[in-house]
Each structure stands twice: as C-alpha cells, then as structure tokens.
Amino acid sequence: MFATVLERLLGRYGRQGWWPADSELEIMVGAVLVQRTAWRNAAAAVERLKSAGALSTNVLTTIPLGRLEHLITSAGFFRVKAKRLRALADSVARAGGVTVLRSYPTPRLRAYLLDVHGIGPETADSILGYAFERPVFVVDAYARRLFARLAYPDPLAADATLKSECEHALKTASNLNELHALIIAHGRASCGSIPRCLDCCLKSACGYARAESLASA
DNA sequence: CACCAGGGTGGTT
DNA sequence: AACCACCATGGT
C-alpha cells in the first residue's frame, strides 16, 4: 500500500528531488529554518547565510545572536530559530563535527538529534533522511492526514507505527525521501486544505482507487 | 483582509 | 498525557 501511494503520487507530481544543498550542515540548518514556514522563505534565509559565509559550525557558534537573527528574518520566528541554529552548531562542534556524526548508526544519530534544543521528531527525521540518507520516513501533518483518510474509517495508528511500517515497506532512503516530498506536494496541490475530502483524495481528482482496494494493494 | 507554510517548546490543566 | 499560546515573515 505504501508502494502504491508512492507510485501514484510519483505518476501525478513527478520526482521532487529533495533536498538541494551543498553539505549536510546546510540541510540541517535548512531543516530548522523551514519549521512551520514556507520553503521559499527558509531557502532565502539559507542563501543569506551562505552569502555571509555563515554556513559553517565555526561561524554559527561564534556569530553574535543579533546578527544571526538579522540574516534569517525571512524564515520567520527568527529569534527562536537563531537560538536553535546556535544550539545545533554548538552540539555539532561538541560531537566532533559532521564527519563524526556521519559514522553514527541511525538510532544513535536520531537520539543525538532529538537531544538538540529545537529539534523534534520531524526535524530529526528530515535530517536523518535528507542529510545523512538514512532510510527514514518523516511523519508530518500531511502524512497523518493522508494515511488517516486512506485507512478510513479505521483510526490512524500512532506515528511510530506508521513510520516503521512505511520504512519496512519502502526500505530505501531514496524511496522514503521521495514519498515525504510527494506527500507535501500533494497536500499543497489539491486535497490538503479540503477537510475530510474522501472523494477528492481516494477517487477522481487525484487518481486514487477507493480506499478498500488501495488498502489491499 | 484572513489564512497558511516542509514544528517545537514551555506552561497549564 | 493532552491541550494551549507563542513564535513572525512573506505569499495568496
């Protein structure tokens, strides 16, 4: 069923190609900046950091907080996010740099990320998947809503269950990364803002079969 | 004008 | 454990 959803979304929206970046750190920084924010605005902030030469742990740990805030205003919540970027950079430096993080096994890396102030489950999993290419499914509001509708009328399983079932079904970071991106594209495009639109998502508008046949696919 | 975007934290019940 | 207010800019 996860494979079917991936296949259909792929057919409808095409490859999303997330995450455009030059380094792991850039993705980690972007993941914090994009929290509850349109990617366009977060991306502009990433570019400003890059132009200012601030996209390194060394600079991020030492740059005055006010200057950091100024560089990322376009991403919104800039006071909170500036502190989060600082906490992230401090943490990466303490760990010994991104190279060391790269050698962590996935469970340890996930625990490490969750321990950083300002990084919760979704941001941690985004970083695991897109920066470190670990086979991880990012459970966000769109994913919950979509799979709740696909499972209708059954209640949606807990995040951890949805996550592990999806990871087991799709296996590769490439598949799981693409699915997350596609689910967001789908949410933006059509069904996302329409409450309980079973017709829209499961049948005509988005090319889905009915829920029953999809669940058994 | 209101509403939302690739969340997480801290405080209250 | 389940809510809740809050954070703030830029596009539609």
Image (cartoon, coloured by chain):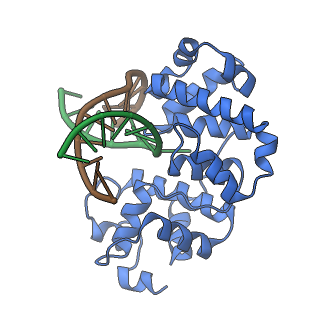
Chain colours: A blue, B green, C brown
Residue plotted at (44% across, 61% down)? A143
- The front one of A83 and A145 is A83
The image quarter in which residue A56 lies:
top right
Q: Is residue A31 visible?
A: yes
The residue located at (40%, 62%) in the rendering is A144
Establish if A119 lies above or below A191: above
A52 shown above or below A20: above
Total marks drawn?
0
Q: Is residue A2 placed above or below A95 in the rendered structure?
A: below
Q: Position of residue A116 (x, y in %)?
A: 58, 39
Question: Residue at horizontal 73%, vertical 34%?
Answer: A94
Q: Position of residue A122 (x, y in %)?
A: 51, 50
Query: Can residue A17 be seen from the camera position used here?
Result: no
Percent position of residue A75, x then y = 48, 28
Measured as percent of width and height from the top left, residue A28 is found at 64, 39
As rendered, which of A162 and A75 lies closer to the eye? A162
Q: Residue at x 60, y 26 (%)?
A: A86
Q: Quick check: A105 above or below A73?
A: below
In the image: residue A48, left or right of residue A35: right
Left or right of C5 on screen, residue A99: right
